[in-house]
Amino acid sequence: MASSSCLASPSGAALCRPRRPRCRVACSAADAGGNTEPAWAKGAGRLACGVLAAWAVASASNPVIAASQRLPPLSTEPNRCERAFVGNTIGQANGVYDKPLDLRFCDYSNEKTNLKGKSLAAALMSEAKFDGADMSEVVMSKAYAVGASFKGTDFTNAVIDRVNFEKADLTGAIFKNTVLSGSTFDDAKMDDVVFEDTIIGYIDLQKLCRNTSISPDARLELGCR
């Protein structure tokens, strides 16, 4: 069974990623004196561990938006769907925004250019379609994606923080070198999802592994027990 390498965050939470032969990030739990220190890898490894630790601290006091939470009325702004191509960068770590990013029912299927690298703080995405879209390097913090469709969506190098994917369709989605922090996947469709060098907290991993639609190969990649 795959094991995990961990970094103890300031909040005390263990931040882990599956240990694989191709793993580029190594994080140690403690040194001989009991002091918690990351054994930094070069380049991307240093950045990935640092980002995950920062997001874990922010996530501790800011839970995911519940599916039962009352949402605002659908925006009547004519170009509301196009606002995803600009994103929202104000207070992205805590989902604070200057104007609601309402992407509900929008269709971004096979969008390969305009979503890449965008910050989508507290975006409302329920029932939207992102099938086949390139969402690599996006930062999604406290987004509400209940019932949305992400079939074949590429989340490579993305930061997915406190996103509610309840009942979303993530069939064939790609989480390669992706930070998954505090997000929920209850009743989500996760057949053929690709997890490669995914960075995820230990508690979040336990919750994710409860989703029975994850394939045996993906479960092994994650280190599900």
Image: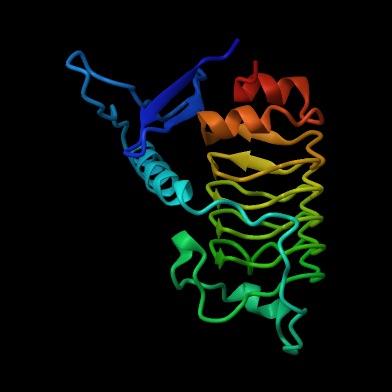
Could you say where residue 148 lies in the image, as x and y percent from the top left? 79, 57
User: Considering depth in this image, is 167 or 72 the residue closer to the camera?
Assistant: 72
Q: Residue at x 77, y 70 (%)?
A: 104
Is residue 83 shown above or below 94? Answer: below
Q: Quadrant of the C terminus?
A: top right
| Left or right: residue 99 compared with residue 106 | left
User: Considering depth in this image, is 134 or 151 the residue closer to the camera?
Assistant: 151
| Left or right: residue 159 compared with residue 215 | left
User: Considering depth in this image, is 30 or 49 the residue closer to the camera?
Assistant: 30
Is residue 17 shown above or below 69? Answer: above
Could you say where residue 37 lies in the image, as x and y percent from the top left? 25, 28
Quarter of the image where one finds residue 145: bottom right
Is residue 52 shown above or below 99? Answer: above
Q: Residue at x 53, y 35 (%)?
A: 200
Could you say where residue 95 lies in the image, as x and y percent from the top left? 52, 64
Q: Residue at x 82, y 40 (%)?
A: 189
Q: Quadrant of the N terminus?
A: top right
Quarter of the image where one finds residue 47: top left
